[in-house]
Structure formats: structure tokens, C-alpha cells
């Protein structure tokens, strides 16, 4: 069982930055992958970034590559998403997720555990 709690969302102006946090608790050894997804109003949930929790390997969606960084603390208790040069198209509910197989990490079905999400709004 893995528990995830996001924080750090809010209102930011276009061009600004925001860092989201996801506190991770429970058993995450044995090949877990942690991901960030987002869902904008009227759209499907989409992959943003992911990290192999043990090895630190990262993956990014093409739409955010170069603007977004996924990271974790050394104790592996918190997952982060640093977002820079934000645009109104980044407005969405952002959720962190955990899955036990770091393969096809952009696929929602690969993730078993989800946080409640945090709202991010970018004003123009």
C-alpha cells in the first residue's frame, strides 16, 4: 500500500514557476515508478513526467520537456515537480501516482495508487 499526498498548487502568472510536492509513504521498494499526471477541464488526464524510484531515471512528456523537472529527496519520501515558464495551457489538476513496474510509464493504467490532486492555475 502506498499513500500519496500532493501540495504546492496555486495561482501563478504566465512565465512564472511553481514546485509541486508529493509526500510518499508506504512500501515503495521493488521497482516502483512515481509519476505526475495532469487533467485540464474538459480533457483527459495526461502524462507529465515520471521517475524510476530506485534508479532515478526520468521520463518527460514532449509537451513539457525542457520546462519541467521531476525529482525526489534523498530519503525517497517526497516527489517533486518543478515547472518553469508556465503558460495558461499548464492549467490543470496535477496528481502524483505510483506504480510497481517502470515500463510504459506514460500509461495511466500502469499506476495503482493516486493522490487527491492539486489545482494549478496559470493566468495570462
Image (tube, grey):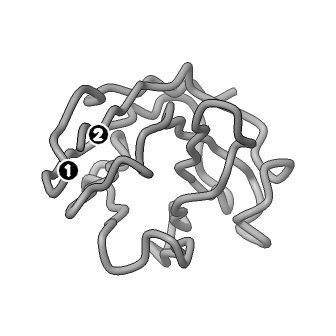
Report whether 74 appears left or right of 76.
left
Q: Which residue is mark 2?
A: 122
Relative image position of residue 104 (x, y in whole percent): 79, 71
The quarter of the picture where the N terminus appears is top right
Task: Specify few, some or many for label 1: CA neighbours under 10 Å numbering under 14, 14-19, or 20 or more.
Answer: some
Q: Residue at x 53, y 39 (%)?
A: 96
* Residues tagged 2 and 1 counted as in contact (Cβ below 8 A): yes
Disc 2, SS: strand
The quarter of the picture where the C terminus appears is top left
Disc 1, SS: loop
Residue located farthest toward the right when viewing the structure as drawn: 109
Report whether 27 appears left or right of 54.
right
Count the numbered circles shown.
2
Depth check, front residue: 34 or 64: 64
Q: Is 19 drawn above or below residue 4 in the view shown?
A: below
Task: Specify few, some or many for label 2: CA neighbours under 10 Å numbering under 14, 14-19, or 20 or more.
Answer: many
Relative image position of residue 75 (x, y in whole percent): 29, 49
Q: Residue at x 42, y 77 (%)?
A: 65
Q: Is 120 drawn above or below residue 18 in the view shown?
A: above
Q: Toward which corner of the image does residue 105 lie, by quadrant?
A: bottom right
Q: Which residue is mark 1?
A: 14
Q: Residue at x 29, y 39 (%)?
A: 122
Relative image position of residue 94 (x, y in whole percent): 49, 37
Relative image position of residue 119 (x, y in whole percent): 41, 25
Residue 46's disc number? none
Residue located farthest toward the top when viewing the structure as drawn: 116
Q: Earlier in the sequence, mark 2 or mark 1?
A: 1
Report whether 51 appears left or right of 67.
right
Q: CA distance from mark 2 to mark 1?
A: 6 Å
Q: Is 34 drawn above or below residue 92 in the view shown?
A: below
Report whether 63 appears left or right of 97.
left
Amino acid at each position: 500500500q502506498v499513500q500519496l499526498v500532493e501540495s504546492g498548487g496555486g495561482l501563478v502568472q504566465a512565465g512564472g514557476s511553481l514546485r509541486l510536492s508529493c509526500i510518499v509513504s508506504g512500501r515503495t521498494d521493488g521497482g516502483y515508478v512515481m509519476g505526475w499526471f495532469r487533467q485540464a477541464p474538459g480533457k483527459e488526464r495526461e502524462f507529465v513526467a515520471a521517475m524510476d524510484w530506485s534508479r532515478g531515471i526520468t521520463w518527460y512528456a514532449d509537451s513539457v520537456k525542457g520546462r519541467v523537472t521531476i525529482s525526489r529527496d534523498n530519503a525517497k519520501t517526497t516527489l517533486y515537480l518543478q515547472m518553469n515558464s508556465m503558460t495558461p495551457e499548464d492549467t490543470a489538476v496535477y496528481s502524483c501516482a505510483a506504480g510497481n513496474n517502470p515500463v510504459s510509464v506514460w500509461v495511466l493504467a500502469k499506476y495503482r495508487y493516486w493522490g487527491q490532486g492539486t489545482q494549478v492555475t496559470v493566468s495570462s
